[in-house]
Image: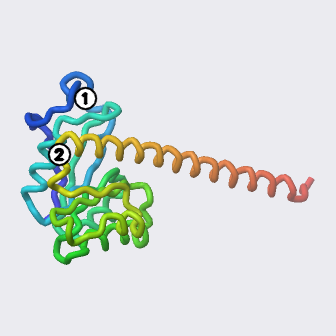
């Protein structure tokens, strides 16, 4: 049950972030405007999807709105990520179809999908079943929250920090690809210059 939901017309009413009405309020996008940041919400509880989307509906970062994709199981999440490699952030529940489904997804994102750019924030509603310190050390994730502690304000801060980190990594990745292409071109030109002339 995948849904790519770009309808973000709701208004944040609870725990509004100071300055959000001016600095971070959504603005109508022109057809040629920048693409939205894509965020994947992974949770087997539909209410979590609704509340998360509601809390982030007016957020704008670097002139770009947020676009939400949804998955309700680990397998579904991996399928969505495989089809959408430009997802910037995954808000990932730990306990879904199994007690460690989210941890398995986090590992598969890095090892099977080879996606090292997307930021992964784990969320759990049952913190007693997961050891936060060992998870942070053993898995390539970027944050870990108990759902009851993740208020609208903290969620906002976590998302913006994650998007900023993703943007930096993406820029570095593009620069690396450009340097590799330039190096390969230089090698080809050097090899061509060493070829004997037919003249």
Label placed on residue 24: 1
| Residue position for label 2 | 151
Image quadrant assignment for residue 79: bottom left
At x 42% / y 45%, what residue is drawn? 165
Does the image show residue 27?
no
Instruction: Where is residue 100? Give x, y as percent.
Output: 25, 74
In this rendering, is residue 152 above or below 47? above
Few, some or many C-alpha atoms within 10 Å of disc 2 (few <14, some 14-19, many ≥20)?
some
Few, some or many C-alpha atoms within 10 Å of disc 1 (few <14, some 14-19, many ≥20)?
some
The front one of 174 and 143 is: 143
Instruction: Where is residue 23? Give x, y as percent.
Output: 26, 24
In this rendering, is residue 190 above or below 81? above
The front one of 48 and 129 is: 129
User: Please, what secondary structure does the residue beneath circle 2 have?
Assistant: loop
Image quadrant assignment for residue 153: top left
Report the Cα–Cα distance between label 1 and label 2. 18 Å
Apparent side of residue 122 relative to residue 109 in the rendered image (left or right): left
At x 31% / y 35%, what residue is drawn? 61
User: Please, what secondary structure does the residue beneath circle 1 have?
Assistant: loop
Q: Earlier in the sequence, mark 1 or mark 2?
A: 1
Residue farthest toward the top in the current orientation of the protein: 22
Image quadrant assignment for residue 27: top left
Label placed on residue 190: none
Foreground label between 1 and 2: 2
């Amino acid at each position: 049950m995948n849904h790519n939901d770009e309808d973000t017309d709701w208004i944040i009413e609870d725990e509004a972030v100071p300055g959000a009405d001016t600095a971070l309020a959504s603005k109508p996008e022109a057809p040629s405007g920048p693409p939205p940041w894509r965020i994947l919400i992974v949770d087997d509880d539909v209410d979590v999807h609704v509340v998360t989307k509601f809390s982030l509906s007016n957020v704008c970062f670097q002139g770009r709105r947020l676009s939400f994709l949804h998955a309700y199981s680990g397998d579904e999440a991996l399928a969505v990520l495989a089809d959408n490699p430009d997802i910037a952030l995954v808000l990932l529940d730990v306990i879904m179809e199994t007690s460690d489904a989210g941890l398995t997804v986090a590992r598969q994102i890095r090892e099977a999908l080879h996606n090292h750019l997307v930021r992964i924030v784990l969320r759990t509603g049952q913190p007693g079943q997961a050891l936060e310190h060992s998870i942070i050390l053993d898995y390539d994730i970027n944050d870990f929250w108990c759902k009851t502690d993740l208020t609208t304000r903290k969620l906002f801060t976590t998302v913006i920090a994650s998007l900023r980190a993703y943007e930096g990594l993406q820029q570095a990745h593009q620069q690396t690809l450009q340097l590799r292409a330039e190096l390969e071109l230089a090698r080809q030109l050097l090899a061509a210059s060493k070829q004997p002339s037919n003249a």
